Amino acid sequence: MTRLVDLTQPWGDRMPTWPQFEPVQVTDITTHHRDGKSTVLVRTNMHTGTHIDAPSHYWTTGKSLGDIPIGDLYGTALVIVGVLLHRRRPLTHSDRRGGAEG
């Protein structure tokens, strides 16, 4: 059975954005504790967070979110183990799980 892993970034006021833009601002309007419901005001720019439709922001031929087939959003991936990052060298095939070449 295929295992799908969601690679989207967490949503919130710590989402990465372009350096020249203001950080994301999330302000509570209502809260569950105080008001019995949760509503937030979000101030951000459109180039924030996970961005699968980025080409549509730069080229008229880029697909918008609704035009991207779901089948284009999954595929084979390589899991990079964080412990390798301290070596400060390019990853090679031998760095893969088990060190097998291939």
Image (spheres, helix red, strand yellow):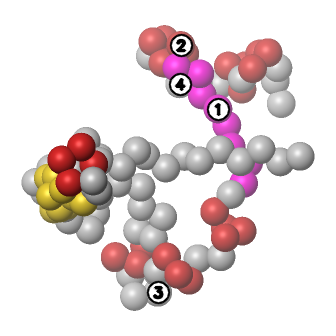
What residue is shown with label 2?
83
Q: Does label 1 or label 4 sit earlier along the sequence?
A: 1
10 Å crowding of disc 2: few (<14), some (14-19), many (20+): few
Q: Amino acid at mark 2?
A: Val
Residue 17, can we see it? Answer: no
In the rendered image, the residue lying farthest to the right is 1
Q: Does label 1 or label 3 sit earlier along the sequence?
A: 3
What residue is shown with label 3?
61
Contact flag, marks 1 and 4 (Cβ < 8 Å): no
Is 49 displayed left or right of 6 in the figure?
A: left
Mark 2 vs mark 1, CA separation in Å: 12 Å
Q: Which residues are magenta?
A: 75-82
The location of residue 48, given as percent across then percent down, is 29, 58
What residue is shown with label 1?
79
Q: Amino acid at mark 1?
A: Val
10 Å crowding of disc 3: few (<14), some (14-19), many (20+): few
Closer-to-camera residue (92/53): 53
Q: Amino acid at mark 3?
A: Thr
10 Å crowding of disc 4: few (<14), some (14-19), many (20+): few
Is 37 displayed left or right of 60 in the figure?
A: left
Point out which mark residue 90 bears.
Answer: 4
Taking the spot 49% from the left edge, 76% from the top edge, the residue there is: 65
Q: Check disc 3 and report its element: helix, strand or loop.
A: loop
Mark 1 vs mark 3, CA separation in Å: 31 Å
Mark 4 vs mark 2, CA separation in Å: 13 Å
Q: Amino acid at mark 4?
A: Pro
Q: Check disc 1 and report its element: helix, strand or loop.
A: loop
Q: Check disc 4 and report its element: helix, strand or loop.
A: loop
Taking the spot 72% from the left edge, 68% from the top edge, the residue there is: 71
